[in-house]
Amino acid sequence: MMSNDVLPVMEHFYTIQGEGAFAGYAAYFIRLGGCDVGCHWCDVKDSWDAEKHPKIEVKQLVEYVKQSKAKIAVITGGEPLMHDLDLLTTQLLAQGIRTHIETSGAYPLTGEWDWITLSPKKFKPAIDSIFKQCNELKVIVFNKSDFEFAIACAKKTNSNNTKLLLQAEWDKKSEMYPQIVEFVKNNPVWNISVQTHKYLNIP
């Protein structure tokens, strides 16, 4: 883990949150380099090697967010919790910017967060403590066995305070969304997440 005043950044941009509980909200995305979870269907595999990406000072990242007028900063990856995010979130919150993270939960939580989206993966299990800390559990459905995985993950959360979401893996959406629809109808504590940014053709 490098010093927390610089972070490897694959990309950063102002856009509309496309999925999950905050779909439709304007947000500034900071995609950090580095991931060892190894999802074979990952759509940002270029993020995996942290050394490939430029190191940017935290104060500069915060300035980018400020200049965009965004009220939400989403820290994602890769796997963002491979890095110490205490300084980044402290400085964002000091500017009145909401801090959101999207993580597999494979590493301990650092930083102070207004919203934690946990998207656990079978390839590298999430640590138990983060299930109780997340606001949103988003399980990607690649095949039928992922429904059982989702149920097992949900049992570890604070179910009354955690939004439960199922989202089809993009390339299998035509196959899996009909199954997700039936599952949610039979298990209405769950909701459906759709990658609206891909339909809108925005980053």
Image (spheres, rainbow, N blue to C red):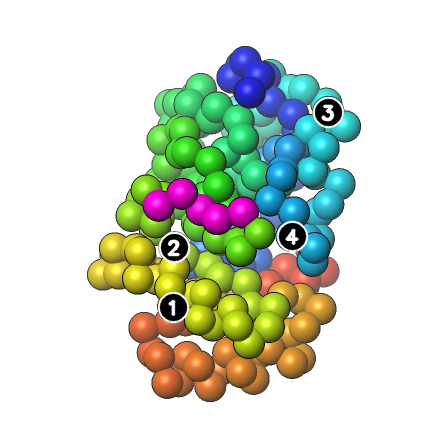
90 left or right, relative to 12: left
Secondary structure beneath dot 3 equals helix
Callout 1, which amino acid? Ile
**Residue tagged by mark 2?**
136
Q: Position of residue 198 (x, y in %)?
A: 68, 62
Do the residues under discs 3 and 2 have CB atoms within 8 angstroms? Answer: no
Q: Is residue 2 left or right of residue 107?
A: right
Marks 2 and 1, how far apart at CA: 14 Å
Q: CA distance from mark 4 to mark 2?
A: 20 Å
Q: Which residues fall within the magenta stretch?
A: 124-128
Reading the image, the residue beneath label 4 is 39
Question: Comparing marks 3 and 1, which lies closer to the viewer?
Answer: 1
Label 3 environment density (alpha carbons within 10 Å; few <14, some 14–19, many ≥20): few
Q: Residue at x 53, y 26 (%)?
A: 83
**Residue type of the residue flagged with mark 2:** Glu
Name the residue: 53% across, 54% down: 121
